[in-house]
């Protein structure tokens, strides 16, 4: 019986900069990505 491994990532500081780019790269590479941030007013549209 084959059980698929699920890759999970939690990234903080995702409203901009390195956190945003890291969360996008992880999501594109098959990770279930949870992106967190303190200030939702700073969210970049991407």
Image (cartoon, helix red, strand yellow):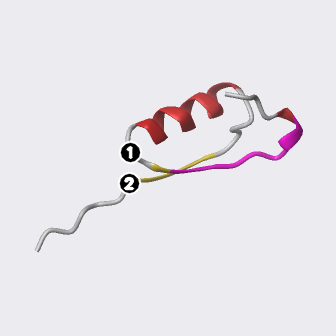
Q: Which residue is the extreme one toward the right? A: 41
Label 1 crowding class (10 Å Cα cut-off): few <14, some 14-19, many 20+? few
Left/right placement of residue 4 relative to residue 43 reads left
Q: Which residue is the extreme one toward the front? A: 45
Which disc is residue 5 wearing?
none
Q: Which residue is mark 2?
A: 7
The image quarter in which residue 23 lies: top right
Say how many tags the image has. 2
Q: Position of residue 15 (x, y in %)?
A: 74, 35
Instruction: Tell me which residue sits at (28%, 60%) in the image.
Output: 5
Let me know if residue 38 is in the magenta part: yes
Instruction: Tell me which residue sits at (14%, 68%) in the image.
Output: 2
Q: Quadrant of the N terminus?
A: bottom left
Q: Position of residue 17 (x, y in %)?
A: 68, 25
Left/right placement of residue 21 relative to residue 15 reads left
Q: Quadrant of the C terminus?
A: top right
Q: Which is in the foreground here, disc 2 or disc 1? A: 1
C-alpha span from label 2 to label 1: 7 Å
Q: Which residue is the extreme one toward the bottom? A: 1
Element at badge 1? loop
Left/right placement of residue 45 relative to residue 11 reads right
Instruction: Tell me which residue sits at (69%, 38%) in the image.
Output: 14
- Position above or below: 31 against 6: above
Residues at circles 2 and 1 in contact by the CB criterion of under 8 Å: yes
Left/right placement of residue 42 relative to residue 3 reads right
Element at badge 2? loop
Q: Which residue is mark 1?
A: 30
Q: Which residues are magenta?
A: 33-41
First-in-chain label (2 vs 1): 2
């Amino acid at each position: 019986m084959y059980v698929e491994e699920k890759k999970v990532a939690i990234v903080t500081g995702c409203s901009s900069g390195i956190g945003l780019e890291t969360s996008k790269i992880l999501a594109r590479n098959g990770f279930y990505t949870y992106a967190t941030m303190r200030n939702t007013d700073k969210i970049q549209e991407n």
